[in-house]
Image: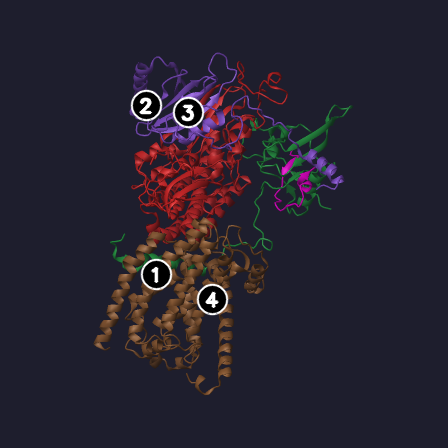
Amino acid sequence: MKERLREVLERFKVNFSAYIIDINEFRGQTFVILGDGSPIRDIVGFLKTEGFNHLQTLTAVDYLQKSGVPRFEVVYQFYSIDQGISLRLRLQVSEDKPEVESIVDLFPSANFFEREVYDLFGIRFMGHPNLKRILLPQNWEGHPLRKDYPLMPEDKPRDFLELVELKERLGGYGIR
Amino acid sequence: MSEKSLTTKEYIYTTEDPFFSPLTIQMGPQHPSTHGVLKLNLVLEGEKIIDLEPEIGFLHRGLEKLAESMNYAQVLPLTDRLDYISAMNNNTGYALVVERLLGIEPPPRGKYLRTMVCELARIASHLLWLATHALDIGAMTVFLYCFREREKILDFFEMICGARLTVSYPRIGGVRVDVEEKVLEEIYNFIPYMYEKIEEYEGLLSQNRIWLDRTVGVGVISAEEAIAYGLTGPSLRGSGVAYDIRKHFPYDAYPELDFEVPVGKNGDTYDRYWCRLQEMRQSLRIIKQCIEKMPDGPVCAEVSPDLDMQVFKRAFRAEAWGEKTFIAFLNEGVELVPKGELYSAVEGAKGELGFYLVSDGSGRPYRLHIRAPSYVHISALPKLSRGHMVADLVAIIGTLDIVMGECDR
Amino acid sequence: MRRNPYYLLFRDLLGGLLITLKTLFRKPVTVEYPRERVKVYPSFRGRHALVRDPETGDARCVACLKCVQVCPSRCIDVKYEIDEKTGARIMTQYNIEALRCIYCGYCEEVCPVGAIVLTEYFEYSVRTREEAFFDKEKLLKNWDEFIAKYTEKVYTNKFWNLKGIPDVLKPAPKRKQLEVPVKRG
Amino acid sequence: MALGESLPLHLEILIVLIKIAIVLGVFLFHAAYTVYAERKILGRMQARLGPREVGPYGLLQPIADLVKLLFKEDIVPAEAHKTLFKIAPLLVLTFAIVNLSVIPFHPSFIIADVNLGVLLILAFAGLGTYGIILAGYSSGSKYSLLGGLRSASQILSYEIPLSLSLAGVILYAESFHLRDIVEVQVNSLFGINVFPQILGFIVFLICAFAETNRAPFDLPEAESELVAGYITEYSGFRMGLFFLGEYISMYVMALLISICYFGGWAFPWWLANALPFLKAIPPTLVLALKVYFFIFLFIWVRATFPRYRFDQLMSMSWKILIPLSLINFLIVALIKWLGV
């Protein structure tokens, strides 16, 4: 299993050496960090031909304020059901141009994942057939999973005691 | 048919018939058989589905964002609310990802208990699936029979941890409290009873010609396509792919237990039904082995983090963004817990339930992404149901076994 | 299936009919709720209560604020004063918004002295939101109401005495058996 | 009929009115309590209790239901075609009730003693569909519309095997009158029609389920697919009328099965000869017991089976039931030709 993964990574390095920033391991999980602007569609296509047939998940992380790296990272977790090896791609995406190539045509299961990332992070997936908000209403403003999204709403949330007070005050005017 | 789901207005149907116009129906979010608040925009020709577009998010509670402001132990009750039908699996999945991050190994008794309750939850979930699936197809008696048995399992949960649905029983590094021998004995006695009841459901459905007519050849998906569309769990195994996290990424006590992964052939609704029923039997087998092999000892690792574990407050940068805006950003340099990121999955009742966790060392998840099987399964719904009838759509929604709490998170 | 000769004999359908007919003569499993009660198992996580100490007659809370800290839904609010003589904390307010509570039981698990508890009392529907807002007096009253129907001599809770959990993980007072004698009168 | 000939017209009308009142009263009562029985039996078959709260054993439940239905708000959707929307439930109920007029409940108790009884029932059953189609069309809801369409095609397909299977019975009795059908069959070689015409009986039974929109053919109101089909938009008493219509047509079908295939109020000659005391049982009671059994069967089947799909139902009708009923007709013709 390990050998097979090493083989794939060797070939990976040969083909896409220009884009690879780091290949590392944490708790036995191998990941590849790819630089901003990598041809992710080609890379995923390559992985697919290598037998990674199951896209376990696709998501993004916002590394706001982390020094020296682009702000976003789109994460692809692949698994090969036949060979039993998994590989994670971490594609860096800059804040100025949050655009990534879509992989829906290679992995149809990425459809909703990409929409979710678009919805919650504002990263656009170029070539996605139906890129619109999925979990939030279409008219929502902002992208909540970004770290600079306001944690407090414009109106201060009222806790219960304040609500009771308000109700009593309004009750004095005959408003229920 | 292109991958793009067409909305009503964009829809142009090319047909010879000049009088033809498609019928559009918005099915849900309060339709009796959309299993929660799923909404489907259907484009029909008569009763035949030409296209459909799922609309989700009605139950979105921002769990992933919420988790970022809690410590690792506090997030666990949130995961109850994912797939609330089998909350044990979610809790275990979350506990596992944190354990793997922190490098904790639960003691054997904790592992076995967790495996046992997970399998009980799987049976409970499959019972609810069978109940609603059968009700969708019109067999209303199975619905109540399944609830009869599910009630017993929920009773066990109540005995074990004091709650029936949102259990929060596993904890990081084991389980929260030990189970009395008396309760284990009761669960052990429940196993033959449950075998008998599964026979009863099969007697009502498996051979029934109406059930066969309604399920065989409906919602067929080949093995390759099923993998490509991200189906996991019994929905994938119905297509003949023996992909089971319990075998591929063994966790807890599963490597020490003997069980099979039932696999279907045709990838239709009937095979998925058959797989789930067999899986219930396998689950019973696992529970039996768990109770028989249950070791003694503590149920929780000594290095398990406390519920009120220490956390570092994240820095706030208020001035630049106005008074009301808080920014939580990465803590560089502090390390209460290991830094890193990992993906770990468990075999939830619905499929692969994955947690992608990024730790910045502060004691709170920097990012917690939940790979919910229902979410992916719904994205495969248009593919599965095009060309079928409305009645089949109901069967297909049932066979995918979706829970909106998990899908919308 | 269709080639099976039994297909013409409707054996599949008759088998199904037989199962439902058998059930017709079995005992139904319904529990007629207001008249019959389901058994509530010990340590069920139900209505909140502050344990009234049988000696002092007051709550046992020492205002350590651990419950406030762990509550995932942040529904607990505790206010305290410092006793000028001894320097000890004295709890003055203890508020729980029961409508926000998710009944995870973390508060009773983390409480070092067993002051807060989720009782086995589950029937407490209310008509107004105010009634579901439990302050200290109400929480103590909840305890009295619960204990009035409690039949055992001492009350103890699974989450006070965590069986099978290593002692390292427990706060010091909880390492020995924690229980409250039930006083009737 | 012996009654009418010697009586003046107004008396005759009075007698007919009294008969109608009796039949209506009995059947409305039965329909109400069939709902109760259905809920109770379904409940027990599903390991639960069924209604229990109103009255002893929940016996007053139908009355409570009636009161509830009467006092509920009568909603007419803004999108609905108002007139048709209001007429539709009446149509369903009327054409269900009219069927009862030609059914003999006793050798000498029949409201309208017409010779073409069976034909009339078939005609009215077809007309009753209009109520459902109109309800689906006029509700202004797409679910209702689909329900109405399903009903239309369903009834269309099932009228034919229903009539064809009845044709065998009619041919055997050489009469369209239900009384003649009973009298001929109990004195025939087999005693009851179900033995020579087992195929016809099965076809008729299946069609009866389909005609009355009962499970497993309750597609027009399939609640998991079409919410409630054509009754989605109805509330209060209008919805109650639909249910009343459904239950009365269930009774009509049960009556037809018992009369056409099981000898109605009489026992087959071999049974009556073997057990002479059976003759002492009042004929109406005998008929009632047979009818109750079939009503129980309706409920029993509903508790057990899943629902067919719309197109499967149609193909079953055209590909299986119609050929079977034709074969049945041929068998009857053969028997007739042989003269047994």
Q: Residues within 10 Å of mark 3 (few under 14, many from 20)?
A: many
Which secondary structure, mark 2? helix
Sequence order check, earlier mark of 3 and 2 = 2
Residue reaching furthest bottom? D6
Locate residue B83, reporting x and y percent: 48, 37
Q: x and y percent of residue B239 in the render?
A: 32, 39
Give the foreground label among 4 and 2.
4
Q: Of the residues shown, which amino acid type is indicated by label 4?
A: Thr
* Quadrant in which residue D56 is drawn: bottom right
How far apart are the two marked residues, 4 and 2, measured between alpha carbons? 69 Å
Q: Secondary structure at mark 3?
A: strand
**Chain C drawing hue:** green
Q: Which chain is red?
A: B
Report the residue marked by disc 4: D94
Mark 3–mark 2 Cα distance, whole angstroms, equals 19 Å
Query: Mark 2: which amino acid?
Result: Leu
